[in-house]
Image: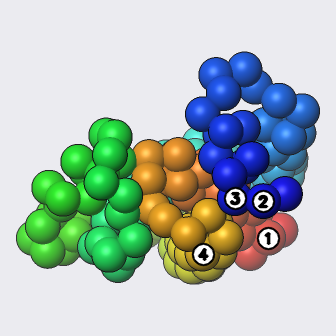
């Protein structure tokens, strides 16, 4: 619909059918990816994939805060976060996630963890950019959706490469 109606719906604390459908879809992708990993590569790789996806997805708000600084609104916690994320924070977040994912991949001897995590990060970033463009701004809701999209995309990517 129009942007005004979308904003009113976004601020409504009741979860609508779209929110429920999105939640079910994301959880379904994550569960299916983890189940596929357990079946094809074992529980250890699935557990490592969950940790790697958690690290990659939690890095996404920091990346978005630096890339889309000009798209932040002037209100709310999301805006505060964007204003307080420095370039050094970005370097630390990305380096930490990369080192963790690479270390896990080496530890379990699976390049699928590293390759899938890179693919998931790129897919999550693309999804976050699309959401931000569609909404016309970056805020806490957009960063939260980026975390969830990246988590699902990373698990899916690792399962795809491992399978």
- Dot 1: what SS? helix
For residue 27, side relative to residue 10 (left or right): right
Q: How far across and down, in percent of the image, does residue 82 sit? A: 26, 58
Question: Where in the figure is residue 142, as x and y percent of width and height?
Answer: 53, 54
The label shown at residue 133 is 4
Q: Which residue is mark 1?
A: 160
Which numbered circle lies on residue 2?
Answer: 2
SS label for mark 2:
loop
Q: Which residue is pictured at 75% across the width and 25% down the height?
A: 15
Q: CA distance from mark 1 to mark 2?
A: 37 Å
Residue 108 coordinates in the image, percent (x, y): 51, 59
Q: Nearer the viewer, residue 42 or 5?
A: 5
N-terminal label among 4 and 2: 2
Q: Say which of marks 4 and 2 sits in front.
A: 2
Q: How did the renderer colour the structure?
A: rainbow
Dot 2, how many residues are within 10 Å of its Cα: few (below 14), some (14-19), or many (20+)?
few
Q: Residues within 10 Å of mark 4 (few under 14, many from 20)?
A: few
Extreme residue in the top direction:
14
How much space separates mark 1 and mark 4, taking CA atoms?
28 Å
Residue under the point 74% across and 47% down: 5
The picture places residue 100, in percent across and down from the top left corner, at 34, 60
Q: CA distance from mark 2 to mark 3?
A: 4 Å
């Amino acid at each position: 619909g129009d942007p005004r109606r979308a904003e009113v719906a976004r601020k409504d604390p009741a979860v609508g059918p779209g929110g429920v459908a999105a939640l079910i879809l994301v959880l379904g992708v994550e569960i299916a990816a983890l189940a596929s990993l357990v079946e094809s590569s074992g529980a250890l790789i699935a557990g490592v994939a969950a940790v790697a996806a958690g690290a990659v997805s939690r890095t996404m708000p920091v990346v978005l805060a630096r890339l889309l600084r000009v798209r932040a609104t002037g209100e709310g916690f999301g805006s505060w976060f964007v204003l307080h994320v420095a370039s050094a924070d970005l370097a630390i977040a990305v380096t930490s996630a990369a080192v963790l994912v690479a270390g896990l991949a080496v530890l379990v001897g699976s390049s699928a963890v590293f390759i899938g995590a890179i693919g998931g990060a790129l897919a999550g970033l693309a999804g976050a950019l699309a959401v931000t463009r569609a909404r016309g701004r970056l805020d806490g809701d957009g960063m939260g959706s980026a975390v969830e999209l990246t988590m699902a995309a990373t698990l899916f990517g690792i399962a795809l490469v491992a399978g």
